[in-house]
């Protein structure tokens, strides 16, 4: 683990220099994006949030620049950088810690691809949703059932959007016929999906979590992390399901213009 040294006046000065550099960069980006006839907007509609807007296509390089430039300024002001080789060396050292993640991600990607081609995740999702629908349970019990089902499916389908695409055509129309809004259905889905993320190896960031755990405990592996996080997953499932039912019972709004019943009244 890196040592935590005392903050010197020069380090504090470097920090402020980095923050000011980032603030200037954000200000330039803001004025460039909001200027009249900006080239960053969609040429057809003039919208910045459009998929075809150049700004949307520049998100990754913009994030890269907004972090690397203040980092370089900080390095030079603090005295850690004296030339370009120091910058390259620092970036190389940072990537050394990612080597384990990149190796694990390669084999995880192979497994996810094979699992996706097998369609087992789709089969489990559809069969589970149909089974839950056939039980014809009450509203509260149905929502808790959705939470548990989604948490289970999350172990086999890592992508949140993929799971929603699989089960929403079944759950949303079914519950709308029973008078429950799509807002409530998605809230139950989000509770189940987020609770079991940390115990599914199919989560894209799971190897990265293992990597950071190994910085503190060298023998940490996939099984160790799952066993350690399982009690938290169970606790989150219980507490967040209770919060959802409590919000529903007390009539607290789920969000802006969100409803519990369908049609919205």
Image (cartoon, grey):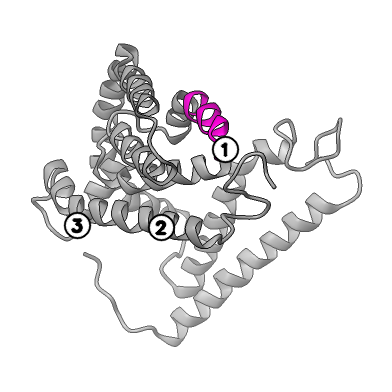
Q: Quadrant of residue 139?
A: top left
Residue 222 percent coordinates (x, y)? 16, 42
State the residue at coordinates (45%, 65%): 82
- In the displayed structure image, the side of residue 51 where residue 193 appears, left or right: left
Q: Secondary structure at mark 1?
A: loop
Frontmost residue, 211 versus 222: 222
Residue 198 percent coordinates (x, y)? 28, 47
Residue carrying label 1: 179
Q: Main secondary structure of the magenta part?
A: helix
Disc 1 versus disc 3: distance between alpha carbons? 50 Å
Q: Residues within 10 Å of mark 3 (few under 14, many from 20)?
A: few
Q: Earlier in the sequence, mark 2 or mark 3?
A: 2
Q: Residue furthest left?
A: 219
State the residue at coordinates (36%, 57%): 242
State the residue at coordinates (37%, 24%): 134
Residue carrying label 2: 86
State the residue at coordinates (20%, 54%): 213
Do we see residue 97 in this rendering? Answer: no
Residue carrying label 3: 215
Frontmost residue, 33 versus 193: 193
Q: Quadrant of residue 117?
A: top left
């Amino acid at each position: 683990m890196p040592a935590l040294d005392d903050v010197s006046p020069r380090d504090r000065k470097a920090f402020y220099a980095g923050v000011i550099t980032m603030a200037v960069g954000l200000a330039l980006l803001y004025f460039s994006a909001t200027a009249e006839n900006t080239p960053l907007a969609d040429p057809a509609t003039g919208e910045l949030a459009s998929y075809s807007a150049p700004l949307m296509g520049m998100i990754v390089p913009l994030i890269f620049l907004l972090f690397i430039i203040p980092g370089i300024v900080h390095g030079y002001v603090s005295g850690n950088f004296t030339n370009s080789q120091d910058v390259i060396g620092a970036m190389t050292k940072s990537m050394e810690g990612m080597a384990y993640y990149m190796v694990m991600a390669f084999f995880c990607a192979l497994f996810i691809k094979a699992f996706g081609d097998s369609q087992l995740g789709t089969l489990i999702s559809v069969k589970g949703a149909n089974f839950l629908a056939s039980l014809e349970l009450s509203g509260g019990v149905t929502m808790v059932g959705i939470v548990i089902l989604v948490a289970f499916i999350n172990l086999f389908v890592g992508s949140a959007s993929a799971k929603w695409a699989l089960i929403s055509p079944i759950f949303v129309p079914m519950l709308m016929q029973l008078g429950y809004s799509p807002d409530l259905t998605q809230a139950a889905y989000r509770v189940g999906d987020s609770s079991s993320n940390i115990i599914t190896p199919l989560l894209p960031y799971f190897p990265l979590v293992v990597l950071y755990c190994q910085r503190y405990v060298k023998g940490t592996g996939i099984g160790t992390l799952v066993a350690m996080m399982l009690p938290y997953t169970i606790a989150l499932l219980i507490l967040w399901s209770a919060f959802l039912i409590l919000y529903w019972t007390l009539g607290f709004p789920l969000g802006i213009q969100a409803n519990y019943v369908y049609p919205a009244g």
